[in-house]
């Protein structure tokens, strides 16, 4: 582990060695839990005259005013200004907060946007850790890492429930929605280039993600806009421009220039890759995919499972079992890792017929993606409420029962061309 000690003025240690630290309930002084109360974290680009550099403001009670073991709201907004700052950089900075805050000894952070959770340990509190120190860390790290575009940075931390509710609903959610909408109106055809991401080569040396507007990175955290911003912030960094001028096969989404880039970026390990097929030259998977999709031979469709789902699938394998055969940066036709957001994409397995092939998903995942999947199915195939025809673990995890249930629901995959 690389330990980077910086001179941030806080009463606890700050190092990447603390990133995986778990704080148990009994050791916790106080908790902020976005799944229960209103919380959010947000970066906002501002004009130069709106930001006072290194101003850290706490609006609301501090940690010593909360009862030991209690749960509260928190909202922190990092406002940055700089000549070269762009609103497109906001989510890229924001995504780093998880790692920044976790580097504090005695502080645990999970999630992002308005689904964050923070725990502060009793030890850290006893050492003198207070809310403003979170601001100090965010300030120092944003200034450190993004000095090329951030001239001034200030942090506002809100701990009053009413403020947090207002900020979450009136400021943060509209900002997140705006970002998502921008991306949702873009298509792969509408942009001049794609981007590579090789951040995961640290663990999977031959893995390359090709990130397009309709296919985000398989970790779910890198959209085309994020990859573009990452490239602009660090032109020699993990995200490089991939041109897409020499189409080889429109059906599976293969381009000569994409192949060339992937070959170069994988040090020759990978020669050809398609963007839209799970069977022919599928993209590789590293290890951090949100979901895995695999073909289900009895129904002629595919099952998807996600990391949070610990149970069995009709493929006879759990997520970790599927992950062990799909990951590692090698092409495994019939299986692929992907982001949650990709499930509702019109480019999802386009070569094999698209989302019409999905026959099974864990119920929680299905609930999360249902609105968008239904919308895509309506648009592509004219099917209403398509998710009602997708099975889940509350229906069955047995392949024979699955086919019987799908037959009853008249699932389209049953009458599609065989995949193998
Ligand atoms: Fe980059 Fe995410 Fe792909 Fe890893 S999984 S290479 S972080 S886009
Ligand atoms: Zn990865």
Image (spheres, rainbow, N blue to C red):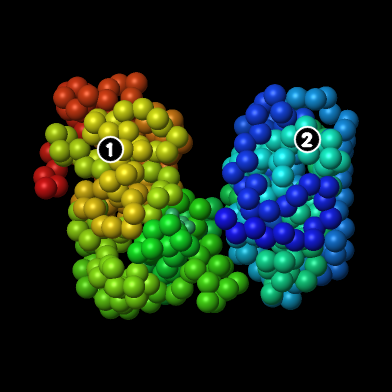
Would residue 18 appear left or right of 187 to someone viewing this image? right
Q: Mark 2 points at which residue?
A: 123
- The picture places residue 222, in percent across and down from the top left corner, at 49, 57
- The picture places residue 240, in percent across and down from the top left corner, at 46, 73
- The picture places residue 11, in percent across and down from the top left corner, at 83, 47
Q: Is residue 402 visible?
A: yes
Q: Earlier in the sequence, mark 1 or mark 2?
A: 2
Q: Residues within 10 Å of mark 1 (few under 14, many from 20)?
A: many
Would residue 75 appear left or right of 285 to someone viewing this image? right
- The picture places residue 156, in percent across and down from the top left corner, at 81, 50
Kindly tell me whether mark 2's CB lies below 8 Å from ligand 1: no
Towards the viewer: 333 or 415: 333
Q: Is residue 156 visible?
A: no
Q: Which corner quadrant of the image does residue 188 belong to?
A: bottom left
Q: Quadrant of the N terminus?
A: bottom right
Kindly identify the residue that appears in the image at 72 percent across and 45 percent down: 105
Towards the viewer: 296 or 141: 141
């Amino acid at each position: 582990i690389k330990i980077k000690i910086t001179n941030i003025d806080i009463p606890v240690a700050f190092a990447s060695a603390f990133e995986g630290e778990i704080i148990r309930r009994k050791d916790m002084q106080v908790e902020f839990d976005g799944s229960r109360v209103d919380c959010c974290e947000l970066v906002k680009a501002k004009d130069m005259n709106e930001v006072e550099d290194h101003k850290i403001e706490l609006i609301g009670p501090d940690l010593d005013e909360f009862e030991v073991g209690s749960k509260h709201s928190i909202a922190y907004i990092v406002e940055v200004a700089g000549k070269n700052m762009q609103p497109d950089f906001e989510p890229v900075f924001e995504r780093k907060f998880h790692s920044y805050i976790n580097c504090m000894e005695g502080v645990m952070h999970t999630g992002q946007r308005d689904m964050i959770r923070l725990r502060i340990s009793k030890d850290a509190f006893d050492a003198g850790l207070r809310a403003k120190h979170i601001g100090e860390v965010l300030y120092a790290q944003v200034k450190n890492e993004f000095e090329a575009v951030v001239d001034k940075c200030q942090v506002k931390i809100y701990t009053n429930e009413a403020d947090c509710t207002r900020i979450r609903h009136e400021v943060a959610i509209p900002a997140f929605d705006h970002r998502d909408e921008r991306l949702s109106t873009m298509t792969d055809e509408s942009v001049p280039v794609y981007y590579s991401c090789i951040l995961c080569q640290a663990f999977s040396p031959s893995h390359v993600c090709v990130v397009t507007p309709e296919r985000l990175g398989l970790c779910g955290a890198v959209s085309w806009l994020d990859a573009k911003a990452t490239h602009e912030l660090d032109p020699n960094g993990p995200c490089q421009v991939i041109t897409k001028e020499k189409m080889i096969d429109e059906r599976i989404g293969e381009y000569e220039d994409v192949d060339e880039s992937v070959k170069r970026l994988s040090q020759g390990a990978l020669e050809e890759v398609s963007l839209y097929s799970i069977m022919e030259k599928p993209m590789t998977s590293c290890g951090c995919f949100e979901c895995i999709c695999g073909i289900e031979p009895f129904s002629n469709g595919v099952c998807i499972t996600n990391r949070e789902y610990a149970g069995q699938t009709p493929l006879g394998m759990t997520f970790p079992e599927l992950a062990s055969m799909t990951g590692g940066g090698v092409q495994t036709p019939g299986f692929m890792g992907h982001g949650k957001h990709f499930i509702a994409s019109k480019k999802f397995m386009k070569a094999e017929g698209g989302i019409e092939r999905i026959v099974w998903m864990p119920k929680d995942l299905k609930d999360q993606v249902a609105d968008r999947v239904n919308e895509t199915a309506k648009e592509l195939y004219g099917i209403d409420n398509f998710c009602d025809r997708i099975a889940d673990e509350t229906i069955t995890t047995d392949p024979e029962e699955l086919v019987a249930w799908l037959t009853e629901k008249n699932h389209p995959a049953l009458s599609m061309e065989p995949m193998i």
